[in-house]
Every structure is written in C-alpha cells, then in structure tokens.
Amino acid sequence: MNEPRTNLCELSLNGPQATIMLKRVEAYNALNIELISEITTLLDWTSDHSQTKGGFLRVLHLCAEGRHFCAGADVNMMRDAGSKSEEENRRDSERLDGLFHRLWSHPCFTIGRVQGVALGGGAGLVACLDHVIAEPNTKIALSEVKLGILPAVIGPYVYRRLGSANFRRLSMLAGKIDSKEALRVGFIDQLVHSESSLATASVEVAEEILTSAPTAVSRVKDLTARLDNWDGTDEALRSWTLDLTSEMRGSVEGQEGLSAFLEKRDPSWKKH
C-alpha cells in the first residue's frame, strides 16, 4: 500500500482513521495550487481506501500545523488571477471546487480541528466537514466581498451548512466572527477549552462514529445530497424514502444491526 507523497500536507494512518495535516505553516496554510492539488490527491486516496469501497478507513481528520487552520487563497495566486484569462480563472476555480466537493462527499466521516483563522477558502474547508471542533480563539470569515469578489465556489457548501439567511448576512458583512458566534450559527459543532484539547475531542468523536455501521454512515451523505437536490413531488420523495428504508433493512448491515439489538450484543462492526 503506497501512500501518496506530498510536500505541503501530510497523511498519517491509525487503524481505521486517517489524518490530513496542512503544513504550509509559513503562509498560514493558505491554499496555493500545489496545496490544493496535494489535498485533493490525499482525499482521493483515502476515499479509495474507505471501508465502503472495500478498504479499511472509516474516519478522516483534517487539521493544520501552526497558529492558523487556513488563511484562505494564497495571495500570489490571487494576484496572478488578475492577469489570467476567464478560461484560466475558471480552471483554477474548478480545481478548488474539486477539492471542496471531494471533502463534502467523502465516504468517511470527516472531523475538522480548527485553530486560529479560517478565512475564505479556509471557511470553505470548514463548511465541507461533517463535524468541526474549534478552540476559543478561532475566527472564521467569508471575506471575499472585501476583495471585490464573491464566495461563489465555496457558496454551495457554506450555504448548506449555515442556511440561507446566515450565509447571506455573513457573506455581505465579510468580517471575522468569533468561536461563540460560529457555534451559534452552525459553522462549527463543538467548542473546546483550549487548542491542546482539539486532538482529544476529535478522538472522542471518532470513537463514537466507529460504533455506527460504516456503510449506513456513508449512505447518510447520499441521503442528504438527494434531499438537498430533490426536485420531484412530495409523494415521490416519500415513496423513495420507503424504498430506501426497505433496502437498508434487508442489507447485510441492516440485518446484523437488528439481530444484534434483539440479541442484546454488539454488532460486528464494533469489534474493529
């Protein structure tokens, strides 16, 4: 099993858990083309090795070395955008969206550990995670309009996490919100007492998710995406959910889970 080689981020494995750590510390982990490409490569590799695809991974942690989680787009990359054609800027945007979409739809349960700032694209990374843990000094901003641009590429992901009103308000204000406000509006899910508590808290969340059926956890993401994008009738939606429920009850995991419940024992997946 050959893990990808990277320079600006690092992949580490611990049983069914993987951790991607951003390591572009001198630039506050700002997203340049190289870092975007490397994170994307690691997301593809961990996805391909997830348990739902015949691999072994069930949990993916995303964290960053240094004072700040991610300061957004790299300043040089933003400067270069001014001299690029519309087609070149679109390709850059497609690369960034590919990163966000892979994180959003990753088959593993994703946990983020956030310290310092998460600005622009950094806020986009936060929005794509399943569970976000932050420390008291964390500040998040959808800062794009301060630069005369829009939070468009990160928009679908932040909108889903915050909802319409908070996405619109925070995108227009474009200022930094503190960790308590981020918790209140749903940008983060858990606030710990100090930066040193981030790793411990993420382990506790991972231990909880490992008690749930791996395929069922992954299928929740499919269910959510279908509900987000449903354009049929209410009757058709209800019918589809009945079919899905029947399918999952008859699946190997569904039968094992129900049997374990009735027999008052742990299901097989709790032993791994």
Image: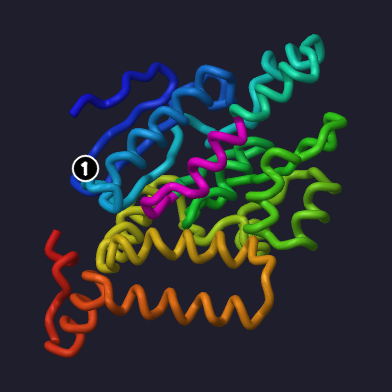
Residue 87, x across and y down, in percent = 75, 19
Of 225 and 4, which appears nearest the observer? 225
Residue at position x 67%, y 70% in the image:
232
Residue at position x 36%, y 42% in the image:
47
Instruction: Name above or below for residue 39 compared with residue 237.
Output: above
Amino acid at circle 1? Asn
Q: Quadrant of the image for the N terminus?
A: top left
Marker count (numbered): 1
Q: Quadrant of the image for the C terminus?
A: bottom left
Instruction: Name above or below for residue 27 compared with residue 259.
Output: above
Residue at position x 56%, y 59% in the image:
225
Q: Is residue 200 left or right of residue 116?
A: left
Residue 90, x across and y down, in percent = 72, 25
Find numbered disc 1 in the image and state the secondary structure of the residue it sits on: strand
Q: Which residues are magenta?
A: 96-111
Q: Quadrant of residue 262?
A: bottom left
Q: Residue furthest bottom?
A: 262
**Few, some or many C-alpha atoms within 10 Å of disc 1 (few <14, some 14-19, many ≥20)?**
few
Instruction: Name above or below for residue 231 compared with residue 18.
Output: below
Q: Is residue 224 magenta?
A: no
Instruction: Name above or below for residue 21 compared with residue 163.
Output: above
Residue at position x 29%, y 68% in the image:
212
**Figure colour scheme:** rainbow
Q: Quadrant of residue 216?
A: bottom left
Residue 183, x across and y down, in percent = 60, 61
Q: Is residue 106 magenta?
A: yes
Residue 222, x across and y down, in percent = 48, 60
Of 212 and 228, which appears nearest the observer? 228
Q: Write down the residue under mark 1.
A: 14
